[in-house]
Amino acid sequence: MADELQRITVLLVDDEENILKALKRLLLDEEFDIETASSGEGALEKLKTLENVGLIVSDQRMPGMNGAEFLGRSQEYAPNAQRILLTGYSDISATIEAINKGGAGRYLSKPWDDDELVQAVKGAVDLYKQGAENRRLNEIIAQQKQEMAEWNDNLKKRLLQSTATIREQNQALKSIDDRNPMALVHHAFDGFFEIMGGRNALHARTVSTLVTDVARKMVMDAETVATFRLGALMHDAGKFGSLTFGLNKHLEEMSESEVSEYRQHTLRGEQMFCRDEEFAGILPLIRSHHESFDGRGFPDGLHGESIPLGARLIAIADFIEKSARSVEQNRADYALMSAKYHAGTLFDPQLVAKFQSIVKLVFYEGKKAGSLAEVEAGFMSLVPGMILARDVESGSGVLLMQRGNILDTAGVAMIRSHYKKNPPPHGIFVQIVED
């Protein structure tokens, strides 16, 4: 596979030397190497030693082995190469044979038109490049799938081992006192995330901290707090072993296949814990943490208070953590501001405000309240209602919107469109007011 990323070779085959010279002159300035052979037999011998052959151009009428037969046999040595047949005769049967058996993708009549031939060769080389890139990506995907499957299998084994240990400890705990066993479960998995480390572990533990503190401030009972705490910690467990694990993209930026894969993680997370009674309370939290308050979420399209309370809290905490980590400064204020803009659509508006004090503590930066500030946000993070702190320009310096403007839906769409096509080396600076 690595050879296909090297400089491409084009093999020209014709029994007439002047034809080969003419072809070489036409293609002399192109960005590929040119090799020639004066017979099908000689070309096959040369193919045994050549690397990264992207195109074979062969004459049909040659002494000994004709072009159709040669192209057919060439597939043994250069299976992925494109093939073009040159024919100076109205030999339809030979052309059909070259296409059906020899793998020829195109034929050109002799004498040829120079421009048409050059474009045909360049087009065939481009097709080979595309095929080589697709094969490279497929190989990477296959390797990633294998690695993810192995990682997921190991994770399941570790979770099963943890579950067995938890059961034993629960039994011992019940015989000692009446403490909530969910605290022990959380402690075990929190230790797992601590060992795992990395961005995803930090995200899970921060979301759990935010949800736990809000649940306590809402004066929930100890069992509910413990359930919400564990559900928040494990809300993204279904991403483990997925090709989208660690994928740092907004949903709008994902391909169709990535979106489909991503939307499965809530269901996979639920399935990971559905066999153990100890985890019954966290199942609806894991399943529903991507439901939207306006009913446009997944996987069930729940809306309003039909979404479990714990899932509504996890959704807000998940968004706040990601928003805060997406900027370099004013993290708490930016995350809270962004969450407020989504209140009533993505999030329960009654719950968003309850996160303010804990978010200020978790992302504390020691700044005075009440001061104007700005933050550099990614273009996919823009939300209608945000105020521009600086002029917005495209990568080529075209003014898109002036500072002080309040973004609406059309403005957000316009900026995103320009930034996707012609992005500058920085994000969009939006204004925030620290509470």
Image: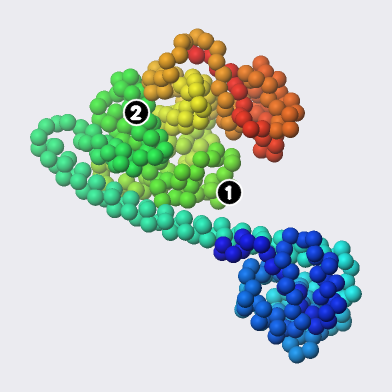
x and y percentages locating residue 89 in the rendered image = 87, 82
**Residue 256, numbered label:** 1
Q: Is residue 195 left or right of residue 298?
A: left
Residue 217 lies, with reference to residue 280, above or below; the image says above
The three-letter code of the residue at mark 2 reads: Thr
Residue indicated by mark 2: 209
Q: Quadrant of residue 24?
A: bottom right
> Residue at horizontal 41%, vertical 51%?
241
Tag nearer the camera, 1 or 2: 2
Task: Give the class, few, some or many, for how many residues have Cα within 10 Å of label 1's Cα (few <14, many ≥20).
Answer: few
> Residue at horizontal 89%, vertical 68%?
113
Labelled pair 1, 2 in contact (Cβ < 8 Å)? no
Which one is nearer the viewer's eye here, 46 or 85?
46
> Residue at horizontal 43%, vertical 19%?
365
| C-alpha gap between disc 1 and disc 2 | 33 Å
Q: How is the image coloured?
A: rainbow
Say which quadrant the N terminus sits in.
Answer: bottom right
